[in-house]
């Protein structure tokens, strides 16, 4: 058995490290833990299905036909923002190549010098100036890079994310530089949809209670009770989350920075990314440019793999050209050897044995000169050989 090196082209997302999952040939990028994301889909779709099935027909007839239309538009917008947040690259930073990691390690060792044994080496940080303020860049031991400002390593996805906000299990993905605005629009529109459904559920029950009574109204619309309960408990968390992120956007701050107290700690360091204006901060976060992905997930790269292959069986010509004792090819010779098919004019000592296999044949250099006996021909055969034969006979 022998190994053969085969090179083939594969997509880059197939070789990306980390703990993300990819679908649709790398177009969809999510975290591996997607159970809570499926629960989010079930709650939104299930609640809206009950609302369209029980409340909308009655409200469209007795109140206004615009109620189900506006609810459908709001529902589609919520689903679009959810899928856009969940299926996109949040801003994952590529890890350093082996050559780049080695070069960075050499730079760090040269800067720190020789550390005596038993002493802890200094922290691996770099200082950069942003808006006349010093910001520290921390070294990531997993990705082998100095993280850009506001970037952090997500322990769940095992990747460094630019402008890392937090990892949200409800959307099944990290929230970072490339999908934060869609996450905020999702929470904002979901809050409006929850309030909208909750309000018209109450209106529907009240209008039916006037005509048929409260208990009969609940019996006629059993899904209304379930909708009210889901909306009531969802309302506080979703609206509260939307309000918290509205506060962060007004300060141009991330959830990670707020939890760590990066700009409100003991040193009272001011936020260098804030414009000191709520309107400007909101415009930068929500209306800023859309940053392209730096991963190039669908790009092509070469992959080399070893494939075991069995050697082909040697042919009869190759067995005659090589010796058993040596793998070197035997040079061609001009000497005449005994014919392979003996005739009646060939002496017995020159006839080859039928039992001799091709592996026992050797070169002329290995045999004594006496073994190479030319075939003996009689005058009759010489005369026959001298007369040319017609192709038709």
Image (cartoon, grey):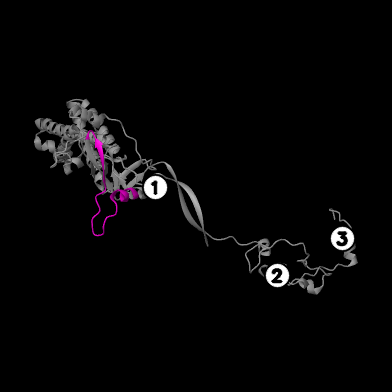
Q: Which quadrant holds residue 148?
A: top left
Between marks 3 and 2, how big is the CA–CA gap? 32 Å
Mark 3 surroundings within 10 Å by alpha-carbon count, few (fewer than 14), some (14 through 19), many (20 or more): few
Mark carried by residue 14: 1
Residue 373 in sight in this render = yes
Q: Does the magenta portion include 113? A: yes
Q: Does the magenta portion include 126? A: yes
Secondary element under disc 1, as helix, strand or loop, is helix
* Residue 352 located left or right of residue 196: right
Report x, y in % for residue 321: 68, 63
Report x, y in % for residue 297: 38, 42
**Which residue corresponds to the image point at 20% horizontal and 42% vertical from the top-left?**
256
Between marks 1 and 2, how big is the CA–CA gap? 57 Å
**Which residue corresponds to the image point at 39% horizontal and 47% vertical from the top-left?**
14
Report x, y in % for residue 153: 26, 46
Range of residues picked out in magenta:
106-132
Between marks 3 and 1, how big is the CA–CA gap? 72 Å
Residue 69 vs 240, above or below: the answer is above
Mark carried by residue 385: 3
Secondary element under disc 2, as helix, strand or loop, is loop
Q: Which residue is mark 2?
A: 366
Give 275 or 281, whichever is nearer the viewer. 275
Residue 344 vs 196, above or below: the answer is below
Q: Residue furthest bottom?
A: 349
Mark 1 surroundings within 10 Å by alpha-carbon count, few (fewer than 14), some (14 through 19), many (20 or more): some
Give 64 or 112, whichever is nearer the viewer. 112
Earlier in the chain: of badge 1 and badge 2, it is 1
Earlier in the chain: of badge 3 and badge 2, it is 2
The nearer-to-camera label among 3 and 2 is: 2
Earlier in the chain: of badge 3 and badge 1, it is 1
């Amino acid at each position: 058995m022998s190994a053969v090196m085969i090179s083939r082209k594969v997509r880059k997302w197939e070789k990306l490290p980390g703990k993300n999952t990819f679908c649709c040939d790398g177009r969809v990028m999510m975290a591996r833990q997607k159970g809570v994301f499926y629960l989010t889909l079930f709650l939104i779709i299930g609640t809206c299905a009950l609302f369209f099935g029980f409340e909308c027909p009655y409200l469209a007839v007795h109140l206004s036909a615009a109620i189900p239309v506006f609810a459908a538009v709001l529902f589609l917008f919520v689903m679009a923002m959810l899928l856009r947040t969940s299926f996109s690259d949040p801003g994952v930073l590529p890890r350093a190549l082996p050559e780049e990691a080695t070069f960075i390690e050499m730079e760090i060792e040269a800067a720190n010098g020789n550390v005596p044994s038993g002493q802890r080496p200094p922290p691996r940080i770099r200082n950069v100036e942003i808006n006349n303020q010093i910001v520290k860049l921390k070294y990531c031991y997993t990705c082998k890079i100095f993280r850009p400002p506001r970037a952090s390593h997500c322990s769940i996805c095992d990747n460094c994310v630019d402008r890392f906000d937090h990892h949200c299990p409800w959307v099944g993905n990290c929230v970072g530089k490339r999908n934060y605005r869609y996450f905020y629009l999702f929470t904002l529109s979901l809050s409006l949809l929850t309030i909208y459904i909750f309000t018209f559920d109450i209106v529907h029950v009240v209008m039916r209670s006037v005509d048929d009574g409260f208990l009969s109204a609940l019996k006629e619309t059993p899904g209304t009770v379930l909708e009210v309960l889901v909306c009531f408990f969802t309302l506080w968390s979703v609206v509260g989350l939307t309000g918290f992120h509205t506060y962060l956007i007004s300060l141009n701050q991330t959830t990670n920075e707020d939890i760590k107290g990066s700009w409100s700690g003991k040193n009272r360091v001011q936020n260098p990314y804030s414009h000191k204006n709520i309107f400007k901060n909101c415009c930068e976060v929500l209306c800023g440019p859309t940053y392209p992905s730096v991963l190039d997930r669908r790009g092509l790269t070469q992959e080399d793999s070893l494939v075991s292959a069995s050697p082909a069986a040697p042919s009869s010509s190759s067995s005659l050209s090589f010796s058993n004792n040596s793998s070197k090819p035997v040079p061609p010779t001009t000497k005449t050897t005994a014919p392979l098919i003996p005739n009646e004019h060939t002496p017995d000592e020159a006839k080859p044995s039928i039992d001799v296999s091709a592996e026992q044949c050797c070169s002329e250099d290995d045999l004594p000169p006496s073994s190479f006996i030319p075939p003996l021909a009689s005058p009759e055969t010489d005369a026959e050989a001298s007369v040319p034969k017609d192709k038709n006979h």
